[in-house]
Image (cartoon, helix red, strand yellow):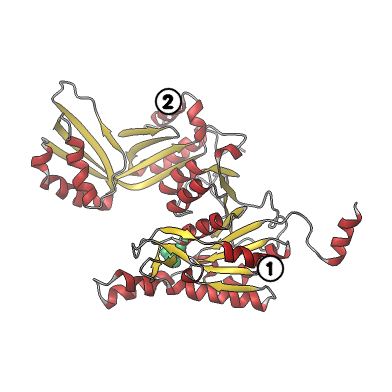
């Protein structure tokens, strides 16, 4: 053992490489002062190890909902700039409280609101996008050993007013900040301990994944694995920010928690970093889907635009779209899915546009489920889809529609079969085996 190593132990100086880490804590992680103290211990563990740390916090659990409901009660039709002034307040409180607790534990911490950094956004109040973050002051303060506690979910618009990023936006704040300061990792602390092969409430044999590629996570996140705001993953993919999903409910000082290379949780990273690619990474599902079919539709240029234009204007989020090749060159069928809650509205929009579209009948059904098999390994493996179809057939589950992409197969089925289908597919691809 080198003399240097022994000396550093004696002086209590941290051993090992220094990293720059952004730590993000969601609402349940800062729900009350006890939870905030627990968060502070996670932060102190990293600073004690000699790492440079910036923290991003959400509002205490339930606070943002309360603030939103006050703005509605005050006036249903309110100014979006004043909505932002109100709802950004939750993060102001949690960031200040965490800074106070950290200081009381001897950590040199300081809170920052979005406008103070500044986190510059566009003018879309209530759903603003981050345009730029100047990380230089934060980096200088890292050098002085200061921990920045940054209010998530907020920035400042070109009109010099507070702007919020849309619900769940502090994940995006954290990733943007990590990109701005070129952090080694953006740790997202939440109430689950990682990303699983499927929902463990449906399949108890679901396993925590060690690594997930950005593209896979985008599919998993938008298809029901509600761990991360989808936009934050998009941003991380663009800037190659390594995100790490882990639990704030793990004991802060448990063995391995501060392990730089292999802490407990799931790394979301570039696919190049994933050496051993599985063919299938996970099974996602979305319940409460509805299917709409337009029968005997004129097969002519512009017909799809005539359908989906009005639906998009009505802010209806269309998901699977299937059009068949027409048999006689004159008429075809179009099927697509929407969330069940949007079905009636969609039918109204379509009937209003009936003349412009030109269809014979419209059929619809709600209460369906979409099950998706996801994996980047699919790109280079044949037979993945056939395996799914056979497994569902063996269980007597009827498939209503199928769509695929390079890394995903989505299957529409009757809602009551959703859980059986998830379990069946999870086991047919061996996801329950380590
Ligand atoms: N507090 C905000 C919300 O509840 C932002 C967040 O938690 O990410 O939507
Ligand atoms: Mg959240």
Helix, strand or loop at disc 1? loop
Q: Position of residue 329 (x, y in %)?
A: 16, 22
In this view, 86 is above or below 342: below
**Relative to 50, is 357 above or below?**
above
Which residue in the structure is indicated by mark 1? 145
Could you tell which of marks 1 and 2 lies nearer the N-terminus? 1
Question: Mark 2 highlights which residue?
Answer: 386
**Quick one: 266 or 270, which is closer to the camera?**
270
In the displayed structure, 264 sits above or below 322; it is: below
Would you say 41 lies left or right of 162 here?
Answer: right
Q: Residue at x 86, y 56 (%)?
A: 5
State if disc 2 and disc 1 touch (CB < 8 Å).
Answer: no
Q: Which mark is residue 356?
A: none
Locate residue 324, reporting x and y percent: 24, 28
| Residue most extreme to the top | 328
Q: Residue at x 26, y 50 (%)?
A: 316
Q: Nearer the viewer, residue 283 or 403?
A: 403
Distance between mark 1 and mark 2 Cα atoms: 56 Å
**Quick check: 155 left or right of 185?**
left
Q: Residues within 10 Å of mark 2 (few under 14, many from 20)?
A: few
Q: Quadrant of the C terminus?
A: top right
Q: Nearer the viewer, mark 1 or mark 2?
A: 1
Q: Is mark 2 within 8 Å of ligand 2?
A: no
**Residue 200 x %, y %:** 51, 49
Residue 411: x %, y % from top left: 36, 36
| Disc 2 secondary structure class | helix
Residue 369 seen in the current view: yes
């Amino acid at each position: 053992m080198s003399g240097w190593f022994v000396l550093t132990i004696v002086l209590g100086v941290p051993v090992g490489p220094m990293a720059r880490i952004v730590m993000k804590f969601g609402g349940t992680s800062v729900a009350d002062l006890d939870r905030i103290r627990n968060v502070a211990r996670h932060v102190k563990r990293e600073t004690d190890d000699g790492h440079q740390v910036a923290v991003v916090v959400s509002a205490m659990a339930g606070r943002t909902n309360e603030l939103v409901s006050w703005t509605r009660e005050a006036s249903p039709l309110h100014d979006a700039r004043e909505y932002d002034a109100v709802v950004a307040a939750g993060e102001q409180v949690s960031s200040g409280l965490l800074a106070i607790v950290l200081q009381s534990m001897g950590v040199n911490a300081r809170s920052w609101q979005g406008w103070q950094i500044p986190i510059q956004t566009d003018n879309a109040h209530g759903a603003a996008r981050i345009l730029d973050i100047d990380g230089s002051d934060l980096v200088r303060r890292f050098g002085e050993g200061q921990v920045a506690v940054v209010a998530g979910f907020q920035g400042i618009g070109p009109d010099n007013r507070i702007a919020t990023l849309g619900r769940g936006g502090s994940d995006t704040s954290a990733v943007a900040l990590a990109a701005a300061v070129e952090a080694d990792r953006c740790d997202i602390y939440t109430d689950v301990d990682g990303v699983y092969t499927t929902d463990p409430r449906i399949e108890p044999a679901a396993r925590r994944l060690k690594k997930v590629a950005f593209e896979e996570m985008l599919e998993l996140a938008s298809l029901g694995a509600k761990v991360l705001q989808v936009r934050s993953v998009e941003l991380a993919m663009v800037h190659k920010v390594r995100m790490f999903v882990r639990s704030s409910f793990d004991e802060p000082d448990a063995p391995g928690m501060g392990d730089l290379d292999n802490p407990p949780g799931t790394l979301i990273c570039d696919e190049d970093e994933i050496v051993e690619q599985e063919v299938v990474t996970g099974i996602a599902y979305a319940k409460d889907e509805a299917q709409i079919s337009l029968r005997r539709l004129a097969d002519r240029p512009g017909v799809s635009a005539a359908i989906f234009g009005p639906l998009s204007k009505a802010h209806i989020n269309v998901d699977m779209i299937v059009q068949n090749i027409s048999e006689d060159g004159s008429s075809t069928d179009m099927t697509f899915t929407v969330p069940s809650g949007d079905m009636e509205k969609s039918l109204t929009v379509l009937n209003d546009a009936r003349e412009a579209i030109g269809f014979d009948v419209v059929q619809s059904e709600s209460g369906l489920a979409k099950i998706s098999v996801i994996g980047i390994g699919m790109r280079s493996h044949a037979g993945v889809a056939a395996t799914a179809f056979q497994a569902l057939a063996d269980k007597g589950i009827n498939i209503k529609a199928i769509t695929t992409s390079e890394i995903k197969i989505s299957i529409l089925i009757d809602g009551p079969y959703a859980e059986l289908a998830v379990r069946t597919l999870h086991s047919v691809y061996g996801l329950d085996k380590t």
